[in-house]
Image (cartoon, rainbow, N blue to C red):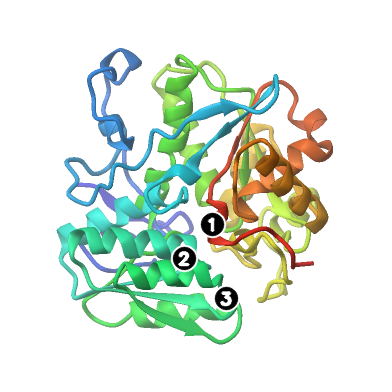
Amino acid sequence: MTTYHCPVDGTRSSTTALTWCCPVCRGPWDLDFTPAPGFGSNALSTRVNSLWRYEEMLPLAAPAASLGEGRTPLVPLTDTVSAKLDYLMPTLSFKDRGAVMLAELARRLGPDRVVADSTGNAGTSVAAYCARVGLPCTVHVPEGTSPKKTEQIRAHGARLVTVPGGREATALAARAAADEPGTFYASHVFNPYFLHGTKTYVYEIWEDLGGRLPDALAVPVGNGTLLLGAALATAELHALGLITARPRLIAVQAEAVAPLAAAFHAGAEDLPPGTPAEAAPTLAEGIAIPRPPRARQILAAVRASGGTFLTVPEDHIREAQRDLAARGFYVETTGVACWAAVRQGGADLVRGGVVVPLCGAGLKTGMGVGGG
């Protein structure tokens, strides 16, 4: 049976339980899961054109929650940089990759309610997929969340709770609600099923590049769900002999909120004690996470890949958004962070071919005019 396990103290729990974190240390779960053998690109041509085509690599199968997510285009930006258009998902962000896994798991467990917390995109995804499977959903968001995102959450029928303060206060409010009996906490941070959804981002790149991966994957990092999913995928592909070398992971943070970048360049294995609990203002609201619960795992994954952290100032975020719009891509301010990093001096660090995600639609935030 697939089980949760705590990477800190080894505590285990059945995935049929609603225990959303390790009861000993209150940290995030990892998942005991090994992909089925025999997976290969030759078996994919006749399969469903969604992320569920990689069924052997996923801990759930035969979903009722699917909205057709995945299989987003990979298009060139320059001779060496390609963009994966994950803003073309059902709810217009990459978070659908993980949210569908959480909703499918919740559907099978049959809780009384689903609770989530988000700066917007994860909340809209969870709300949409809960609507798909008929589960009552409450989404906690910080005050100041984009009105376009809160409108989308309400449109899917979810109850919206606006929490005074920032991202940390919002997470604490949702976790308190998650401790109530009969509640499934659809946490894109604490529940590892979300990471096993985001890893399909890399499987799609591998398939579209003819069974290989680029030299580097640039990934925006707040709570690190896309980066940790990418690390899972590259490890699985390597273990199955489907790639010979793993790409470097280039983690990108906003200069205004860059606790992981600071820890990485200081040689630390975790965030230092006393890291501020609230984030400074930034256009990249989706990655403005001052104390990510999986910080240690994120730092270890980047180091193991031979990658690094890059940070981008607010003016570079604005410029990157305008530049992408001029190329035909209307992307939200968080979603342009990796292009900003590669475009403004990061190319020498990434070296060779690199893929950047355009991970949220511009309709969610409009053009960047504030922050910093």
Q: How many marks?
A: 3
Amino acid type of the residue tagged 2 in the rendering:
Gly
Find residue 287 and report its horizontal and vertical position in percent: 62, 59
Q: Is residue 344 positioned above or below 212 on the image?
A: below
Give the residue drawn at x 47%, y 31%.
Answer: 73
Closer mark to the observer between disc 2 and disc 1 = 1
Can residue 73 be seen in the rendering of this structure? yes
Q: Within the image, what quadrant is residue 338 found in? A: top right
Disc number for residue 27? 2
Q: Identify residue for label 3.
A: 168
The residue carrying pointer 1 sits among few (fewer than 14), some (14 to 19) or many (20 or more) residues within 10 Å by Cα, namely some
Query: Can you give x and y, in whole percent of width and height, for residue 89 in the image?
Result: 41, 45
- Residue pointed to by mark 1: 363
The residue sitting at the bottom extreme is: 164
Spatial separation of the CA atoms under disc 2 and disc 1:
34 Å
The answer to which of 49 and 330 lies nearer the viewer is 330
Q: Between residues 41 and 321, which one lies in front from this camera angle?
A: 321
Disc 1, SS: helix
Q: Mark 3 vs mark 2: give the one in front.
A: 3
Q: CA distance from mark 3 to mark 2?
A: 15 Å
| Quarter holding residue 339 | top right
Q: Amino acid at mark 3?
A: Glu
Indicate the quadrant containing the C terminus: top left, top right, bottom left or bottom right.
bottom right
Of labels 2 and 1, earlier in sequence is 2
Residue 179 to residue 87: above or below: below
Residue 180 appears left or right of 187: left
The relative height of residue 7 versus residue 340 in the rendered view (above or below) is below
State if disc 1 and disc 3 touch (CB < 8 Å). no
